[in-house]
Amino acid sequence: MKAILVNKDDDGYRAEVAEVPESDLPDGEVSIAVDYSTLNYKDSLAITGDSPVIRSFPMVPGIDLAGTVEACSNDAFQPGDKVILNGWGVGENHWGGLAQKARLQANWLIKLPDAFTTELAMGIGTAGYTAM
């Protein structure tokens, strides 16, 4: 999968679009094909390194996402369900939405109402919540 991957090591601080094996995804109950994410202020700080918002490296930034459930280890969601995520330390403590795939905890996710597409949900995104 492709992801924006932020690293900090002896070579310095860098962000790059990288090919990341799905086996590298962090633990979680729900595997998601990410349809959309947004680029927020906190994400820009994470990508540029201008503020220490990332708590562990390597990190995939992206504090929100909308996507399609591929698998769930409990009965909270079914494959094909459309879900959204905002917050929960994603992009800081846990890999976020600026990738093709994500693996997250079920209680972090909200089933997307039928009236919304994943594109529309991220058109609102975290910045939209903030503006309201």
Image (cartoon, rainbow, N blue to C red):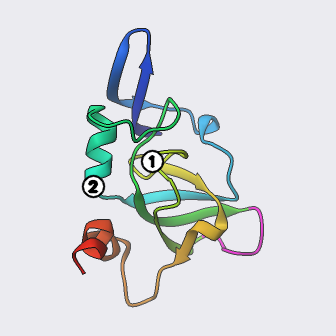
- The residue that mark 1 highlights is 91
Task: Say the numbered circle drawn on residue 81.
Answer: none
Q: Is residue 74 in the magenta section?
A: yes
Give the mark, 1 or 2, whose residue is nearer the N terminus: 2
Residue drawn at x 45%, y 47% is 91
As drawn, is 107 to the left or to the right of 10? Answer: right
Q: Image quarter for residue 12?
A: top left
Task: Say the numbered circle drawn on residue 40.
Answer: 2
Q: From which residue to which does the magenta span run?
A: 73-79
Residue 72 vs residue 84, the one in the foreground: 84
Badge 1 marks a residue whose secondary structure is loop
Residue 19 vs residue 126, the one in the foreground: 126
Residue drawn at x 31%, y 37% is 51
**Residue type, label 1:** Gly
Other-residue count near label 1 (Cα within 10 Å), few / some / many at <14 / 14–19 / ≥20: many
Residue 12 higher or lower than 47, as above or below: above
Could one spot residue 124 in this view of the protein? no
Badge 2 marks a residue whose secondary structure is loop
Q: Is residue 22 in the magenta section?
A: no
As drawn, which residue projects farthest toward the front? 51
Which percent across, then down, holds residue 53? 40, 41
As drawn, is 97 to the left or to the right of 14? Answer: right
As drawn, which residue projects farthest toward the left? 131
**Residue type, label 2:** Asn
Residue drawn at x 26%, y 44% is 44
As drawn, which residue projects farthest toward the bottom? 115
Which percent across, then down, holds residue 58? 49, 30
Q: Image quarter for residue 11?
A: top left
